[in-house]
Structure formats: structure tokens, C-alpha cells
Image (cartoon, grey):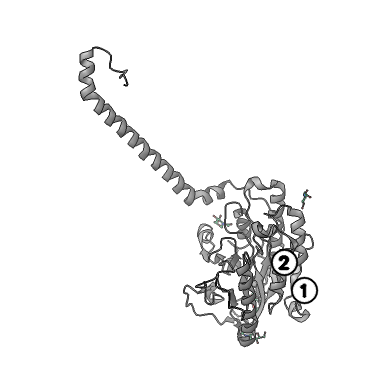
Amino acid sequence: MVTPVILSSSSKSQNHSKKTLTPFAFRCRQQHQLLAVIFSLCVIFLIFYHASNHVDMVLLQKEVHEKIYPLPDGSQDYNLLYSNSTKTSSFAGFSFYLMGDTPYRDWQETRLEWQVKQMKQYTKTHPERNLTFTVHVGDIQKVSLTHCAESAYQTTANLLRQGPLPTLVVPGDNDYYDCPDRNATFQLFMKYFGSFEKQWHKKDVEGLGLIRSESHPELFVFVKEGILLIGLHLINAPESHEDIRLWNARMIANKEWVAKNVQHYFRTQEIRGVILLGHALRSPRTRPFFLTVADYFVNITHRQDLPVVYLHGDGHNWDVDTKLSHQLHWKHFRDIQVDQGGLADPVIVEFAPQIKGKIKAFKDESSDLQLVLGKGLIRLDRQNGLYKHPKNVKNLLK
Ligand SMILES: *[C@@H]1O[C@H](CO)[C@@H](O)[C@H](O)[C@H]1NC(C)=O
Ligand SMILES: *[C@@H]1O[C@H](CO)[C@@H](O)[C@H](O)[C@H]1NC(C)=O
Ligand SMILES: *[C@@H]1O[C@H](CO)[C@@H](O)[C@H](O)[C@H]1NC(C)=O
Ligand SMILES: *[C@@H]1O[C@H](CO)[C@@H](O)[C@H](O)[C@H]1NC(C)=O
């Protein structure tokens, strides 16, 4: 039995109070507890609400925004000086295949082999689409299954090599970062994919005019029909998983690569749009990179009206994100995540031709499987989208 400590004057009053006060005190306590629970829930909700809605804005204010050279400067841009309302330049239309995060399993290897065969067929039967190259946005293996053995790199390279078009692969976390020995596996990644495009016919590769960074050869850049394409080394990693100096060095290398190439190519030729190719999905840790990129476009009138699209994998499902676009008032920026390669058709990213200064814009018939961006300059065609039975690969290759 529990003696009520608070009630001690007389046994009578004790009895009395026992009958009337205890249930009341009990109710009171219950109510207090209930209130406390409700209050805690409110606090937790507010914290989460605040976090989900404002974490980016808070970070935005707190972030150290280091200077990157060359500084953003649009005053000498070709688009400003030579390409005005009377512009007469023409560009052909073209497109490229986009995939990522594959193969993770045996059935995905079979799936990839089949996809590559389909692509080979399709580029032949659809020359009007001017399919010119393929991009794999990283994660060519599942670390827990391959343990980053050289044979995994070899297997994916062999599969992709069967493809009809020069193929560019950007590094993902699974490609070295999550591996037991980061440095050795990064070397493996570079051995197989560091200049992978050279495996294709010289004339197809030379047509791209692709340039790789000398200090970080996984970074690349080229301009095709007025579209500036930049390959990045962006991976997500929790803060405690890597020496912060290595992380910072990689971020700066990415920022400088973008800064240098945007400044150079916007000065020397007419640019119609920019495609950034990387692995990592949007996160607070990679956000500083995108804030720096924004400096090179936002508030530079003739640049901020051009579409800038970041294409990536990592999250494994199709997603078109406009948060950063809204936050920075950067109307034509989009962050697009592709489906995991084993689960869906590769995306065809298409660019409209321009004839005597006028873009032959794609009609905006946006749907689940079609996305038109940049006033009709860019179309993302997901083909048939997700497979109904992705693992059902038994008879695919027959
Ligand atoms: C605009 O275009 C004309 C030729 O079409 C060119 O002479 C001129 O320099 C361009 N730039 C400006 C700022 O007018
Ligand atoms: C494909 O490229 C060729 C040559 O570059 C060009 O003549 C043709 O118009 C392009 N096709 C489309 C649909 O833009
Ligand atoms: C891995 O490479 C980085 C530089 O890229 C270097 O700082 C680090 O010491 C290397 N780690 C090992 C274990 O070799
Ligand atoms: C653009 O200019 C506005 C107004 O001056 C400013 O508030 C904003 O921070 C600038 N944005 C960027 C990304 O530089």
C-alpha cells in the first residue's frame, strides 16, 4: 500500500481526503501528464516543422560563402555583347541517354545488358533524335555485395561498353567513398571510368570536344550545340565520415571547375543552357556548392534567364525539385533525380534546335513521363518510365 505523504493531519481527514482527493489528484496528474505530452508533441512538431521548412534558410544565413576564382562576372559574356534581339545563330538539336545507380544486383546486370541493346537499336532507328552520348550519374555497384572488388568495376565497364554511344560516368559514393579503401578504389574507378569515353570510336568522341580537369580528371566539360555540360564529383557523406579537409578540398575543386568553365565558355561563345551532372541528391551538406553555382547566374540578367539543370541519382526515384529555385529566385534552375537504373528506362535528355536565332521549342506537353523545361529548350523523356516487373529478366535477352 502506498501512504499518501501529502495528507498527514488526521486519520479522519486522511480517510476523507483519500476518498475525494486521491481520484482528483490522480486525475490532475493524468491531466498534467496529458498536457505535458501534448506540449512535448507540439514542441517536437514545431522543431520538425521548423527544421524541414527553414533549415535551408537558416543554413543560408550561417554559411560561410568563400570566394571562388574566377569571380562571377557576366560583363564580357558573348550572350551580352553579340547575341541580342537580332541574333541569327543556329544550333542543331541533339539528345543524350541518362541513367544512374545501376547495376546493384544480378538481375540489374541483366537489365542493363538489355537496356544497352535497346539503346543500340533505338539510336539506329531514330536518327532524328541525334542521340550523341550516354551519362551514368554514378554508383556502378552495391558495396555490400561487391566489396568493391576490381571485378565489379570491370563488369559494369564491360556492360556499358556495349552501348552505342560514348559514355561518361561520374563518381558516386558506392564507387569508392563507401568502400573499405577509399583511395585504392577511387584509383580503380578512375582506371575503368576516368577516360571511359575513349573506348568508343575516335570520331564520335572528338565530336564532343570533351575536356577533363588535369588535377581532377573525373571532372569534365564540353559544349554541344550551345549547351554547356559540366561533370562533377559530388557525393553525400555524413560529416563524421571523412576528414573535413578532404571534404572541403573536393567541394572547392567542384566549385572552381564550375566557376572556371562558366566564366570561360560564356565569354567565348553563345550558351543556351547549362547541364550539371553529378551523383549526390540535394542535402544541407552539398548546398554550399549550389549556392556558389547560383552566384554565377542569379542577378546576371542574361544568364539567369537560361535554364540550369542539375541531373543526378542517389535517391533512386524520379524527382523534380524546385526548392532552391524558389529560395534564390532562380527561376530556371531545376534539380532532377533519375530513377534507379534497374527499375526504369534510361531517360532521353533532349535539346531543341535553334534556327536563325529562334529556338524550335518543344511543346510543353509535360506529363508523368515527359518534362519540358527552359521555355521549350529542354525535354526529359522518361520513355516507358518504371518497369512493371523490373526483376523479371529471365527472358529479356532471348
Ligand atoms: C547586337 O548585334 C549586332 C549585330 O547583330 C552587333 O553589331 C552588336 O554589337 C550586338 N551587341 C550590342 C550590345 O548591340
Ligand atoms: C541532328 O543533327 C544534324 C547534324 O548536326 C542536324 O542537321 C539535324 O537538324 C539534327 N536534328 C534535329 C532534330 O535537330
Ligand atoms: C588518400 O588520399 C588523400 C588525398 O587525396 C590523402 O590526403 C590521404 O592521406 C590518403 N589516405 C591514405 C590512407 O592513403
Ligand atoms: C540577387 O540580388 C538580390 C537583390 O540585390 C539579393 O537580395 C540576392 O541575395 C541576390 N542573389 C544572389 C544569389 O546573389
Task: State the SS at label 1.
Answer: helix
Task: State the SS at label 2.
Answer: strand
For residue 339, what is the image quadrant?
Answer: bottom right
Dot 2, how many residues are within 10 Å of its Cα: few (below 14), some (14-19), or many (20+)? many
User: Residue 174 location, x and y as percent?
Assistant: 66, 58
At label 2, which amino acid type do we have? Phe
**Residue 217 seen from this side:** no
For residue 41, what is the image quadrant?
Answer: top left
Count the marks: how many? 2
Q: Give 179 or 337, whichever is nearer the viewer.
A: 179
For residue 189, what is the image quadrant?
Answer: bottom right
Q: Which residue is mark 1?
A: 198
At 53% from the left edge and 80% from the top edge, which residue is drawn?
362
Q: Give 240 or 273, whichever is nearer the viewer.
A: 240
User: Residue 144 location, x and y as percent?
Assistant: 64, 56
Q: Which residue is mark 2?
A: 220
At 69% from the left edge and 50% from the top edge, which residue is drawn?
247
- Would residue 340 be found to the left or right of residue 209 on screen? left
For marks 1 and 2, the one nearer the N-term is: 1
At label 1, which amino acid type do we have? Lys
Q: Give 274 or 141, whichever is nearer the viewer.
A: 141
The residue at the far front in this view is: 394
